[in-house]
Image (tube, coloured by chain):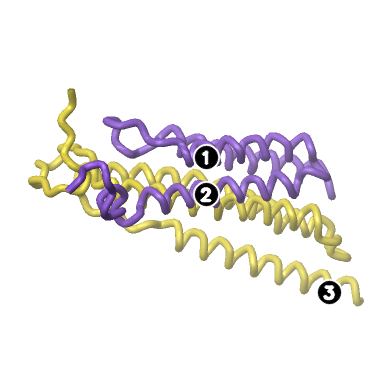
Amino acid sequence: MSPSRIDDIEDVDPGLARERTELAWTRTAISFAAVGGALLRSQPAVGIPILALSLLIWELGRRPRKPGTGHARTRHLQLITVVVLGVALTALVITLVTGW
Amino acid sequence: MTSAASPTGPAAAPRPGEEREPDARFTFANERTFLAWSRTALALVVGGLAVAQLLPPFPGVPGARHIIGIPLILLGAAVAVFSYAEWQANQRALRRDEPLRRSLLPRFLAVTIAVIALLAAALALLSAVTSHR
């Protein structure tokens, strides 16, 4: 058996867990892009940063994990949490300031 | 050089409290769950913003859109924080080979959305009654 040939994807990525997780990151990036795009006309100062962050999230999802450090990516997930909280805070400010 | 066991290979049960890198599939699954909750949180925030910004005003009930929209935004923020806490707790339990705690998020989300929906229905009713008098 040649060691360089991949006979079974299950040996490299069991349950396709890695690929499914990459796709989940892609979905998340698209969600942020959709929000940024929707805000682009009414609140460009908010929409453009969210669009930029969606590109960053897209990139983070595709980046390979460092070997030897385990597979948990605490910093990446903390970033997502902070970004969602930032969007929530911005939405709260917009809502409180306008539209009464 | 660190000698890491194969992520999918068999290994002896760890002693209580001992931490070990879990099967990569579990780490990936935990991460996907967190990402799914984060998207839910984002949707709640944007939904709240849309209610306050895009709906026409409720006749006779000033501020009704804000009474519906602001709790949705706060709920989204809470879901974001809770989902990170649950990811962390699950990852710790996986490393220690302990049972996963039951997630509180589904019930929290269901109850809060139901309360907001009832609130919205009450406001719509109130608006209909006051504006047709």
Residue type, numbered disc 1:
Ile
Query: Element type at marker 1?
Result: helix
Residue type, numbered disc 2:
Ser
Q: In the drawing, what numbered circle is on residue B128? A: 3
Q: CA distance from mark 3 to mark 2?
A: 36 Å
Q: In the drawing, what numbered circle is on residue B117? A: none
Q: CA distance from mark 1 to mark 3?
A: 41 Å
Residue found at x 75% / y 53%: B66
Residue found at x 81% / y 60%: B55
Q: Is residue A28 above or below residue B61?
A: above
Residue found at x 42% / y 53%: A20
Residue type, numbered disc 3:
Ala
Residue B93 visible (yes or no): no
Chain that bears disc 2: B
Q: In the drawing, what numbered circle is on residue B38? A: 2
Proximity of marks 1 and 3: CB atoms separated by less than 8 Å: no
Q: Which chain is yellow?
A: B
Q: CA distance from mark 1 to mark 2?
A: 7 Å
Judge the density around disc 2: few (<14), some (14-19), many (≥20) Cα neighbours within 10 Å.
many
Q: Residue furthest front?
A: A2
Query: Residue A65 location, x and y as percent?
Result: 37, 35
Q: Is residue A21 left or right of residue A13?
A: right
The quarter of the picture where the C terminus of chain B appears is bottom right
Judge the density around disc 3: few (<14), some (14-19), many (≥20) Cα neighbours within 10 Å.
some
Chain that bears disc 3: B
Q: Is residue B51 above or below residue A50?
A: below
